[in-house]
Image (cartoon, coloured by chain):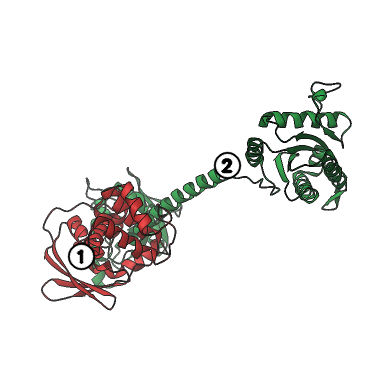
Chain colours: A green, B red
């Protein structure tokens, strides 16, 4: 090394975190910033290896080992608290002395906090300040993004709660059903409500999996839309339960035909990834006459009663509600599908 | 224009004049909403429309409003991030002035979609500077003037600032650094959590 490098004033400015070691491993001079890390005790005069420990490479025993490690990246840490970790690069001089230049490496953020460092403690060419700037700027941006995501998530949940559509099938959902029933009842118009429960759906789900089950529900939904009139509204209540609201019904015959078409079409095998899924449907229907003023829940309960009668009678059937069904012969609300 | 700019104008307005009056600004500007999202991008015509609406509602000239927004960005407690990020630019106010040319690039490093207008510092003799600001937004020079005034205070420097007018989309500021160490200023520790 040339003589100029011995000029500690030059080194203090270029490398404010350097140490100059004697041939016996004593610290002869400490750069202003590294000294700032130990404000209570001057580093000069101490043994280098008493002050810091060499964490990597592990084999460093003494100064002779270290001098041979010239040019290698050293992982160091102060022996006393705060045990700040440092990166080090060591260069032996011709006269037996050694220069160790130090930096915070990845511990920079903790370092500047622990020691209250300022811009002036780093050489202008050091990227430490830019790195700190970047960390702070990116954290602020991330925080703003995180808040935006939270707001969007809340908005999505709110929108979903207000939605009238069942996501899996694209049919209307229970909220939509309630709204339409309220409207029809308030207007005193005649309409029919058809509860449709799939038969054997649980078996498909259990034996072929949820993907097959979801596929069946989507096919079923399409069939129901195809087999009803455009003025009718098909609703998925959840699971394998569906409801069709049919305004403007002229005769029971129309309802019978629609119900039968739905059962017939649903009994056609549904193919899914080489497997065949077979389901059917039980239907219970309530026909509300113009001028009737039933309650919404009453209408739905009556449709349920008719549906259970169909299930009980052996499935794949269509039953119309009549007061005689209520608690009538053989009605068993615990009957499973 | 980046939502951060629009949101800053909104924050400035709401902090000083309240949310109710901001609704009037949003309506007058034809926004169709009241809340700007800082991390979204809006069409360029929105920002001038909002500024026009602010000036109309407050019955204040654009220059004054822009300078206030600039000061607000740096000096408002609760918006420490901007002040801190600017302080990374230099150890002293003089140092900070020299870092201003870098400001658009520094900003882009933090938020790649946020493009600030180019600015260039020209040193004149006897401690004077000219700051040449591209100003796609009329009054951007005044906004920078507000930022500089607040930053000078932050560094504890005494400065005189003057807007030298606008021509061909460029607004120029004259900066006279009267005393670099006029007051204590605010401390800036690299590691302090904003």
**A199, above or below A221, in the image:** above
Residue at coordinates 88% horizontally, 48% vertically from top-left? A268
Name the residue beneath numbered marker 1: A9
Work out which residue is located at the far bottom of the displayed protein and give it: B168
Residue nearest the viewer, comparing A329 with B109: A329
In this rendering, position of residue B178 left or right of residue A236: left
How many numbered badges does the structure rendering display? 2
Label 1 CA crowd tier, 10 Å (few <14, some 14–19, many 20+): few
Query: Residue A161 bears which disc, if any?
Result: 2
Residue at coordinates 75% horizontally, 38% vertically from top-left? A192
Q: Quadrant of residue B46?
A: bottom left
Dot placed on the residue nearer the N-terminal end, 1 or 2: 1
Q: Position of residue B176 (x, y in %)?
A: 13, 68
Q: Position of residue B76 (x, y in %)?
A: 26, 51
Residue at coordinates 83% horizontally, 38% vertically from top-left? A252
Q: Position of residue A193 (x, y in %)?
A: 74, 37
Q: Is residue B32 visible?
A: yes
Find numbered disc 2 in the image and state the secondary structure of the residue it sits on.
helix
**A239, above or below A129, in the image:** above
Circles 1 and 2 on the same chain:
yes
Work out which residue is located at the far front of the displayed protein and give it: A291
Distance CA(mark 1)–CA(mark 2): 70 Å
Which quarter shows the N terminus of chain A? bottom left
């Amino acid at each position: 090394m040339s003589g100029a490098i011995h000029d500690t004033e030059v080194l203090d400015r270029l490398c404010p975190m350097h140490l100059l070691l004697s041939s016996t491993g004593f610290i002869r001079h400490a750069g202003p910033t590294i000294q700032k890390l130990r404000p209570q005790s001057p580093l000069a005069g101490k043994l280098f290896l008493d002050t810091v420990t060499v964490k990597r490479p592990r084999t460093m025993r003494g100064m002779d080992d270290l001098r041979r490690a010239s040019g290698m990246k050293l992982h160091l840490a102060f022996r006393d608290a705060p045990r700040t970790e440092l990166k080090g690069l060591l260069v032996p001089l011709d006269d037996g002395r050694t220069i160790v230049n130090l930096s915070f490496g990845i511990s920079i953020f903790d370092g500047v906090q622990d020691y209250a460092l300022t811009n002036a403690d780093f050489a202008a060419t050091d990227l430490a300040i830019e790195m700190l700037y970047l960390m702070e700027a990116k954290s602020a941006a991330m925080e703003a993004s995180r808040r935006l995501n939270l707001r969007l998530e809340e908005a999505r949940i709110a929108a979903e709660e207000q939605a009238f559509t069942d996501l899996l099938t694209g049919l209307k959902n229970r909220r939509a059903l309630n709204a339409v029933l309220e409207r029809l009842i308030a207007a005193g118009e005649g309409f029919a409500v058809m509860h449709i429960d799939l038969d054997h759906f649980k078996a498909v789900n259990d034996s072929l999996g949820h993907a097959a089950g979801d596929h069946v529900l989507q096919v079923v939904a399409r069939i129901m839309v195809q087999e009803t009139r455009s003025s009718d509204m098909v609703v998925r209540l959840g699971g394998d339960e569906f409801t069709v609201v049919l305004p403007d019904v002229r005769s029971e015959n129309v309802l019978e035909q629609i119900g039968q078409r739905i059962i017939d079409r649903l009994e056609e095998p549904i193919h899914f990834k080489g497997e065949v899924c077979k389901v059917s449907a039980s239907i219970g229907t309530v026909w509300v006459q113009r001028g009737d003023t039933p309650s919404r829940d009453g209408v739905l309960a009556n449709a349920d009663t008719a549906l259970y009668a169909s299930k009980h009678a052996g499935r794949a059937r269509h039953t119309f509600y009549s007061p005689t069904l209520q608690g009538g012969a053989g009605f068993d609300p615990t009957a499973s599908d | 224009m980046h939502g951060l700019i629009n949101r800053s104008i909104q924050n400035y307005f709401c902090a000083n004049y309240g949310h109710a009056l901001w609704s009037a600004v949003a309506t007058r500007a034809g926004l169709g909403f009241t809340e700007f999202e800082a991390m979204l991008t809006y069409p360029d015509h929105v920002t001038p429309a909002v500024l026009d609406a602010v000036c109309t509602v407050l019955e204040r000239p654009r220059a004054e409003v822009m300078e206030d927004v600039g000061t607000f960005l740096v000096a408002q407690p609760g918006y420490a991030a901007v002040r801190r990020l600017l302080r990374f630019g230099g150890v002293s106010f003089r140092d900070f002035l020299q870092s201003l040319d870098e400001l658009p690039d520094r900003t882009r490093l933090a938020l790649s979609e946020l493009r600030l207008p180019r600015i260039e510092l020209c040193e004149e003799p006897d401690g004077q500077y000219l700051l040449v600001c591209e100003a796609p937004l009329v009054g951007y020079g005044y906004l920078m003037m507000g930022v500089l005034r607040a930053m000078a205070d932050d560094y504890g420097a005494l400065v005189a600032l003057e807007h030298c007018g606008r021509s061909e989309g460029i607004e120029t500021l004259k900066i006279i650094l009267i005393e670099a160490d006029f007051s204590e200023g605010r401390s800036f520790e690299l590691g302090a959590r904003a």
